[in-house]
Image (tube, grey):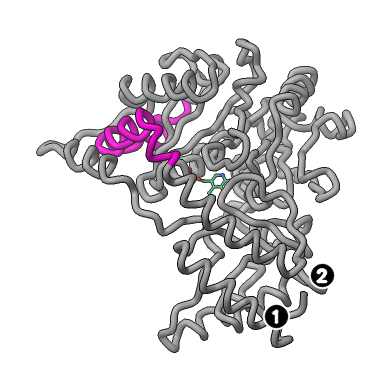
Amino acid sequence: MVTSNPALAQLGGYPLARLQDLANELRADGRALADFSIGDPDEPTPPMIRQALIDAVGPVSRYPTAAGQRELRVAVAAWVARRHGVEVDPDAHVLPSAGSKEAVFHLPLAVLDAHGPRRAVLWGEPGYPVYGRGALFAGGRSDPVTLYAEDDWRLDLAALPTDRLAAACTAWINYPHNPTGATIDVEHYRRQVAVAREHDLLLASDECYQEVWFDTPAPSVLEACDGDLTGVLAFVSLSKRSGMTGYRSGAIIGDPALITRLRLLRPNVGTASPDFVQAAAIAAWNDQSHVDERRAVFAAKRQVVLEFLATHDLEVSGSQATFYVWFRAPGGDDGAYAEALLRERIVATPGRAFGPGGTGWLRLALVPTLEGCRQAVGRWATAIETGRLPT
Ligand SMILES: Cc1ncc(COP(=O)(O)O)c(C=O)c1O
């Protein structure tokens, strides 16, 4: 028999197969479900971005390069300056990615020594599972750090024992945070940068939601570096910012020595975005108005959902940014509550899907339209008022 990468066996099955089966059963009768489960909103990609892609499809197709078009790196650097007030060099500090997911997954291949003493990758849990999976597939070890509501779901490297830090090569932080929507300020980033440097760790900051904020603009780790990007990489994406999940486009920004390493690695993987996607990405990074418009749409949906949850005394935590709302499961069992919601034709994700630390909570992704959100919370309210759902 052909051998297998042991990391595959460690992935385990999908923990929520029962819920999936129930959702599929309900869908079979043809009536729509209000689906708040997947982080892929229905809002269209702005027309000028779509047009930029169409205009860039030429008669001859060529391989794109891993370093990307210079104009794209310049557009990313200009956005960093405009949005975060940080000057970065488009050639030394910026590398395009085909969305953050592949960049997150592939990072350990550049920085993890599978035979060395620092094989672990730290990340906050509940969280995006790809941080740990990238470590496993690179021959390393996933080391999730449990996050708590009492700490506002903040990962604090300073609270970890020294031996745990010494066994790791990389620490991932992700704010605004999936799944809780929690945020951190520049000071918290600054403390994480200091701990990471003290322990020779790479601080990798997944910032794919940082343009989806509501009250205060979400900062970047780049703002906490005071001009010295040593040991720090920020991962940004157009997926959520510009409604471009299907385009696969993002960027890695930071430490020039690490960018050089990634420039060596990434041509081997084949991660370059097609040139016509890069053209659309240039149009997207150069424009901020569509981002503000999208944020206003999410803000309106968020208000509908937050008002409903407050009216019915459902406890919300985090939820300051991202298009996720995170609330405590009435009765404490997130799986049972998700199943009860499904019977009302509302799909939410039980928190345990993001790791054991998410048990007892649920995530709503503000994916349906504003009208869809209104109708769903209307049905939800009726189910509570008639006693079909607990509060
Ligand atoms: C925390 C987090 N990081 C990264 C990604 C991947 O985003 P992208 O579309 O840029 O690959 C997601 C996608 O949902 C995410 O939730």
Q: Which residue is mark 1?
A: 384
Q: Nearer the viewer, residue 9 or 298?
A: 298
Callout 1 amino acid: Ile
Residue 200 placement, left or right of 2: right
User: How far, Cα to Cα, is label 2 from label 1?
Assistant: 16 Å
Q: Residue at x 61, y 45 (%)?
A: 321
Q: Which residues are magenta?
A: 263-292
Q: Is residue 321 above or below residue 354?
A: above
Where residue 246 appears, as percent x and y from the top left, is: 37, 50
Q: Residue at x 47, y 38 (%)?
A: 237
Marker count (numbered): 2
Using the rendered image of the protein, determine whether residue 236 is visible from the camera's viewpoint: yes
Q: Residue at x 51, y 44 (%)?
A: 101
Label drawn at residue 332: 2
Q: Residues within 10 Å of mark 2 (few under 14, many from 20)?
A: few
Reply yes or no: does residue 290 show up in magenta. Answer: yes
Q: Is residue 323 above or below residue 97?
A: below
Reply yes or no: does residue 13 show up in magenta. Answer: no
Callout 2 amino acid: Gly
Residue 185 placement, left or right of 286: right
